[in-house]
Amino acid sequence: MKSVKIGDIKIKNPICLSPMAGFSSLPFRIICNEQGTGYCPTELVSARSIRYNGVDKSLKYMRISPEEEGITAIQLFGSEPEDFEAAIETIMSTPVLKEVSIIDINMGCPVPKVIKTGSGSALMEDPVRAASIVKACKKTLEGICPNIPVTVKTRIGYNAEDKGKPDFVKALADAGADMICVHGRTRPQMYHGESSNEAIAVMREAVRGYGIPFFANGDICDAQSAKKIIEDTGCDGIMIGRAARGNPWVFGQVIAGLEGKDIPQMPSAEERKAMLIRELEGRMKYLPEDVAVREFRCVMPFYIKGLNGSAGIKVRLCSAVSLDEVKEILDFG
Ligand SMILES: Cc1cc2nc3c(=O)[nH]c(=O)nc-3n(C[C@H](O)[C@H](O)[C@H](O)COP(=O)(O)O)c2cc1C
């Protein structure tokens, strides 16, 4: 694929990790960066919470490390432009966050708790408000750090019958969005059923003339599905979500496949366990051990999927409380 610039930021590879709550930890993003990703946004963080509570509560979700991650992106969700303005001002005055490269806005989350506040995918039903949020983010950044681009991640529709929302993405591009990523499912589909490359293509075409990069997302799990979504949609880049859980190697495989090179084999069981431990130890650098292990319980099964005896190991990992216990269960080291 051609190299891509988001605003003035050149990303090394338009193959990125799609943000995932519970999975897009800083250590995992660092690992994905080593596998060749262009960048990996944080999971969604509430702009309103940052506005009223400061960053402390959300720091574990939006901690970044430009030295180890390269390009960084913090994803915010909300429904009030003023919340985004205040959140960005707070982020940009917080030493550990102000080096962020990109601000991403979530306009795709289908979770009822989020949409009932008018945030996430609910914004697809209110393009005027969505555009005003993009404008507010752009304007706030202009006064602080004008070279930070504002990107949006959204879906192909709010209602089951939607087959792409060309006017919605046009409104975002008119408001100044520097990149748009579209997941090929509607809100009611959540993460089920087929992701529609056709509907993504409708949205891609709508903003082709704006000259901003357009990313596609949904069901990419290997080089073949990556090639297909690129061909079907004419996108400039892709984001991979679920297939990367416990499997950062998918990026190396997809990148090799797209470059016409031999696709690397999956690493050995020992290497996969070592990566699991590495991510857990990374999480323990900023969380107490018991909290880190508890939060990591939903991630660990993905690292050991398909290994000998994984079903039994999975059950034991789900009640582990310490790093030593995890190592013992995995028979590691
Ligand atoms: C557990 C989970 C958490 C997610 N959290 C977020 C999030 O915080 N922000 C976001 O924009 N999308 C989120 N998503 C959506 C993914 O980024 C992605 O759009 C979706 O999973 C489709 O891509 P895939 O088929 O490659 O998984 C989440 C998805 C899953 C499965």
Image: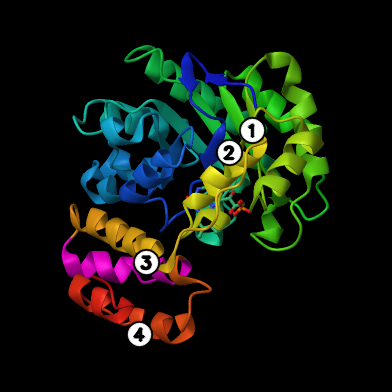
**What numbered label is drawn on residue 316?**
4
Q: Decide which of 236, 191 is in the foreground and name it.
A: 236
Residue 161, given in percent of the width and then of the height, sits at: 83, 52
Three-letter code for the amino acid on which mark 1 is drawn: Glu
**Is disc 2 in contact with disc 1, using a CB cutoff of under 8 Å?**
yes
> Nearer the viewer's eye, disc 2 or disc 3?
3
Give the mark nearest the N terminus, 2 or 4: 2
**Is disc 2 in contact with disc 3, using a CB cutoff of under 8 Å?**
no
Q: Name the residue under label 2.
A: 255
Secondary structure of the residue carrying numbered label 4: helix
Residue found 33% across the figure and 30% down from its top? 86
Three-letter code for the amino acid on which mark 3 is drawn: Glu
Three-letter code for the amino acid on which mark 2 is drawn: Ile
Secondary structure of the residue carrying numbered label 3: helix
**Is disc 2 in contact with disc 4, using a CB cutoff of under 8 Å?**
no
**What numbered label is drawn on residue 270?**
3
Q: For this view, does 275 lie left or right of residue 267?
A: left
Q: Decide which of 155, 143 is in the foreground and name it.
A: 155
Q: Give the range drawn in magenta.
A: 288-302
Membership of 95 in magenta stretch: no
Q: Mark 1 points at which residue?
A: 259
Work out how far the residue at label 2 is from the one at label 4, CA to CA, in angstroms: 35 Å
Work out how far the residue at label 3 is from the one at label 1, CA to CA, in angstroms: 28 Å
**Is disc 3 in contact with disc 4, using a CB cutoff of under 8 Å?**
no
Give the mark nearest the N terminus, 2 or 3: 2
